[in-house]
Amino acid sequence: MRPLVFASLFLLLAGAAIAADPSIGTLSAKAVNRQVSVHFTMAHAFEREETIKGLQSGVPTTLTYVVEIFRDRPRWFDEGIARTHIEVIATFNSLTREYLLNYRRDHKLVRSETFNDLAALQKAMTTIDEPNLFDIGKRPPYKLKVRVKADLMRGWLLYFIPWEFSTRWKAARVAGPPEPAR
């Protein structure tokens, strides 16, 4: 009887892990005038039913993105240059039936928006476009990479073990400015 209980518990936990894995979909970085602009999207962020239910019940839902720029050094330690945290926080107001989105960079409020449509809110939370995010100084852009990871809200494993959902790191090389035509 015990092996059957443990096997069913294992299958239940494995099924929850397979259900919908959030991941960084696309990532691009471009350097112009010693400033690096970063654009990325996150896929499958709202496929967990708990996330939608929590958001619609008025609980603030936060997606935290960690963005780093570093100098890629093969066969040696990478040289970290800069790191920033982007927080996208959504709250549902049940009286006005609107979603409030607060966008913060390094704990400073950048902008606030309201949405009536859940699909538009989800797109705004999972599509990040940051112009001039990093200053690279005199470093050549072709030696630099940007990587991104998302920390989603916490969940509960077996209703009492806190569990944080995070994506894997996704990296992309920084593209330099276009070459002038000859």
Image (spheres, grey):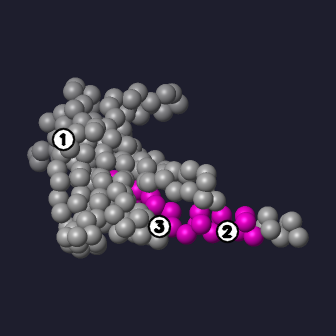
What segment carries the magenta color? 8-27
Where residue 181 sits in the image (x, y, percent)? Answer: 11, 48
Circle 2 or circle 3, nearest the eye: 3
The residues bearing labels 1 and 2 have C-alpha atoms spaced at a distance of 44 Å
The residue identified by callout 1 is 132
- 26 falls in the magenta region: yes
For badge 1, the amino acid type reads Asn
Sort mark 2 into few (<14), some (14-19) or many (20+) by Cα contacts within 10 Å: few
Where residue 107 sits in the image (x, y, percent)? Answer: 27, 39
| Local SS, label 3 | helix
Tell which of 176 and 54 is nearer to you.
54
Tell which of 100 and 80 is nearer to you.
100
For badge 2, the amino acid type reads Leu
Where residue 112 sits in the image (x, y, percent)? Answer: 17, 54
For badge 3, the amino acid type reads Glu
Sort mark 1 into few (<14), some (14-19) or many (20+) by Cα contacts within 10 Å: some
Which residue is located at x 88 percent, y 70 percent? Answer: 1
Work out whether 168 lies above or below 80.
Answer: below
Q: Which mark is residue 7?
A: none
Q: Which mark is residue 50?
A: 3
Residue that sits furthest to the right in the current view: 1
Sooner in the amino-acid sequence: mark 1 or mark 2:
2
Disc 1 + disc 2, Cβ < 8 Å: no
The residue identified by callout 2 is 12
Where residue 161 sits in the image (x, y, percent)? Answer: 61, 51
Which residue is located at x 25 percent, y 42 percent? Answer: 105
| Local SS, label 1 | strand
Q: How many marks?
A: 3
Sooner in the amino-acid sequence: mark 2 or mark 3:
2
Sooner in the amino-acid sequence: mark 1 or mark 3:
3
Sort mark 3 into few (<14), some (14-19) or many (20+) by Cα contacts within 10 Å: few
